[in-house]
Amino acid sequence: MDLAANPLLTDLYQLNMIQAYLEHGETRTAVFEFFVRKLPARRGFLVAAGLEQALDFLESLRFSPEELDWLEKSGRFGKDLLDHLAEFRFTGHVHAMPEGTVFFANEPILRVTAPLPEAQLVETRLINILHFQSLIAAKAARMVLCAPGKLLVDFGLRRAHGAEAGLLAARASYIAGFSGTATMLAGKLFGIPIYGTMAHSFVQAYDGETAAFEAFAHSRPDNLVLLIDTYDTEEAAGKVVSLAPRLKAAGITVRGVRLDSGDLIALSKSVRRILDAGGLSDVTIFASGGLDEDELARIAEQRAPIDGFGIGTSLTTSFDVPALDCAYKLQEYAGLPRRKRSTGKATWPGRKQVWRQYSSDGRMCGDTLSVEEDSQSGEPLIQLVMEHGRRLQPEPTLAEIRARASCDLERLPEPLRRVEPGASYPVQVTERLERLAAEVDQRLAQQEGTRP
Amino acid sequence: MDLAANPLLTDLYQLNMIQAYLEHGETRTAVFEFFVRKLPARRGFLVAAGLEQALDFLESLRFSPEELDWLEKSGRFGKDLLDHLAEFRFTGHVHAMPEGTVFFANEPILRVTAPLPEAQLVETRLINILHFQSLIAAKAARMVLCAPGKLLVDFGLRRAHGAEAGLLAARASYIAGFSGTATMLAGKLFGIPIYGTMAHSFVQAYDGETAAFEAFAHSRPDNLVLLIDTYDTEEAAGKVVSLAPRLKAAGITVRGVRLDSGDLIALSKSVRRILDAGGLSDVTIFASGGLDEDELARIAEQRAPIDGFGIGTSLTTSFDVPALDCAYKLQEYAGLPRRKRSTGKATWPGRKQVWRQYSSDGRMCGDTLSVEEDSQSGEPLIQLVMEHGRRLQPEPTLAEIRARASCDLERLPEPLRRVEPGASYPVQVTERLERLAAEVDQRLAQQEGTRP
């Protein structure tokens, strides 16, 4: 089963609503936008990611005969709906911020313009795709900012929430500036560089650490990194020093050692001393085990001699903030702007554009949220990426997306680059957009006789 | 691409190690166990889940010619390894706790006994499967305990970490006692009951709430639940009261209303009054929007008249604790028990059994962790489920798994049933197991000349 574009990755209520739309002829053009309502604690910015998978999904969405058969047998749906789904293709337009772009609260990063039933069906999966990758890209960007010049590798598949999460987290973290991933399939699917060392089980399977190191070195001599914390880290560093000349004689160079437990700051310093004293000053130290951006910042501050990091759980689950308050909301239907007014969840109506201003030193200094056609100063961030269900060419490569993220992180105001954001970024709403919201409220009040 | 059993859902280091194992003839029988090292804050227990998917994975794991070709072209691996992978089948045994069983720290819920390269290759994906479902089942169980007698429905696909997470969270929460899910594909794959109402976009697409309610009711008359918080919740409740007789005349009964924002406790009380005063005392109130177990407990305490809950983000991301400190560790190789001694990560060696004691009132009162063959009093929880790569029949149905969880939740000691666990559950380690650990340390020290 191809899970990624499965049309049943949707909520029952979407199909219920589509059936009702069809029966009442409500199939005119709808405009939905995806945005984050509010930045969570300790996030000064987010990073747009997942557009490529979102467009893949829209482009390949089809109901198979077997799925249609199952829907029919459920007895829930009428022939109208089943016929509609049998012919279903996404025929709409998509506007979006390029992947890798830094964004803020209330800024749409994707807009769908399509017949109402189409735009409704895809809601659940679009949110599912865009939310997760943007969440992880933002988390990874925090780590990248805390470890300048260091090698960062995604080690997180095992604790990720399922297989797809592991793969997409590898992609999102690579976009944000990670050097690569340990996950083979992410390497195959996305062309991301793959890194790997050895596990404790390898060391444990041998009678003694030195025997394990030697066996591994002879079988995997390229880019050799030895894991030294299975029993006693400092003793193992000593064993590496003793072993290195013997390996050298066989033409094998130890490139690095890995620490995976204990006090990484103290151990990295003592291991560095042991290696240097043993003539192994070229051997790098790689660390893993429960790391997050706070620990990376502490390691940088204490000048621990660690050259690279493998980061798992905190990255692939975005442990401190595993979800964003995001939404995909109807902003226009049948030519009329719409808005939701639920307590704490009100939205800005209509099709919107985000304009980014930069100061003379190249740093971002403020965004403006406007009605689409209301030209403002700055860089317009939202672009057409799919027309009538077909994506526009050429699309950015993963390298280009990564470069955009790198450039945007460089341009972030300094207070937003810190682990504890020191300011919030100014996003201004134009008067015209505020007027539009008031007009929508007024129209609604007139229709219903309710208070605006 | 069938993602679920993809053999490249593994880390590069597994393949590196397997290549080394093959070259050195280290292909004797290895025993790995999966367990959680430590219960996280606010979790008094966990619930085993994911075994069915784990066995599916082991049984169907194969390398396709295309995958082998990609591995070969990477230039990283030798012919030995590629030939081995081309013929790869999982031929080992699996012992496990039945899904739905409550478990605690350091208790293995799965054991793999297989030639070392096989047991190593499957590590990453086995952890990925078992960790996530057990995490979600435990989170869902907390909600079930806080909302006795209420209808609980998983609404979480959109904010789940990818598609697979959404599907497996639907399954895990159903095991733990949820009534169903909103996710169509989870219904199709697992036979879980599917629930759904309507979204704000439906209401917004119409000129006025009443028109939207009426259109929806005529198209979806069965089990009709109207969403009443798009603009003003109390006013909308009044509109439902006005509309109900007109619908009744058309043979349509309003079954419920849904609140999705605002102060759910206060609103449920006022909406209940409005409905009752309008003769709609049979209409149920269903609530959603940012709910978690704390909010459910508060709602129960305040006796808010809410009959059912849709729960999304907090459930499918296990928001307060999005990962467990779990591991899959080598406990025996080539007939000798093994253990890891890394700081804070030491493990109990050998093949183990967990024995559960019950007091006279049927409540669990303590577990014993022993060497497998060391018979203790109580119920042995770990059973053989796969032999030589083939699962034993009959396997439990999802209904049976759900019944086991329900029974175990009933038998939990009262302090562990609370949102804030009032005690920790006693898990005793036998003297013989402690002796075995000391022997392993001693053997290792002799081999290496290091301190035990």
Image: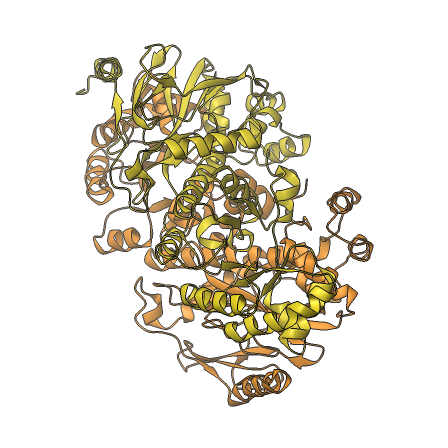
Chain colours: A yellow, B orange
Counting from the top left corner in percent of width and height, residue B171 is at 52, 51
**Residue occupying image coordinates x 44% and y 48%:** B316
Q: For this view, does B171 lie left or right of residue B40?
A: right
Task: Report the residue at 37% width, 16% height from top.
Answer: A351
In what quadrant of the picture does the N terminus of chain B appear? top right
**Does B9 appear above or below A17?**
below
Residue B210 image position (x, y, % from top left): 30, 21
Q: Is residue A400 above or below residue B429?
A: above
Classify residue B245 by image quadrant.
top left
Percent coordinates x, y for residue B448 in the rendering: 62, 82
| Position in image of residue B28 (x %, y %) | 75, 72
- Give whichever of B261, A391 is nearer the camera: A391
Query: A83 or A209, which is in the foreground?
Result: A209
Image quadrant where residue B340 sits: bottom right
- Locate residue B419 relative to residue B70 in the image: left or right: left
The number of numbered badges drawn on the structure is 0
Say whether residue B288 is visible: no
Can you see residue B276? yes
Residue at left 43%, top 57%?
A: A291
Q: Is residue A196 left or right of residue B26?
A: left
Quick check: B192 above or below A226? above
Query: In the image as oriented, which residue stretches furthest toward the left?
Result: A451
Q: Place residue A206 in its image quadrant.
A: bottom right
Q: Nearer the viewer, residue A381 or A408?
A: A408
- The one nearer the camera, B162 or A136, is A136
In the depicted structure, whether residue A305 falls above or below residue B373: above
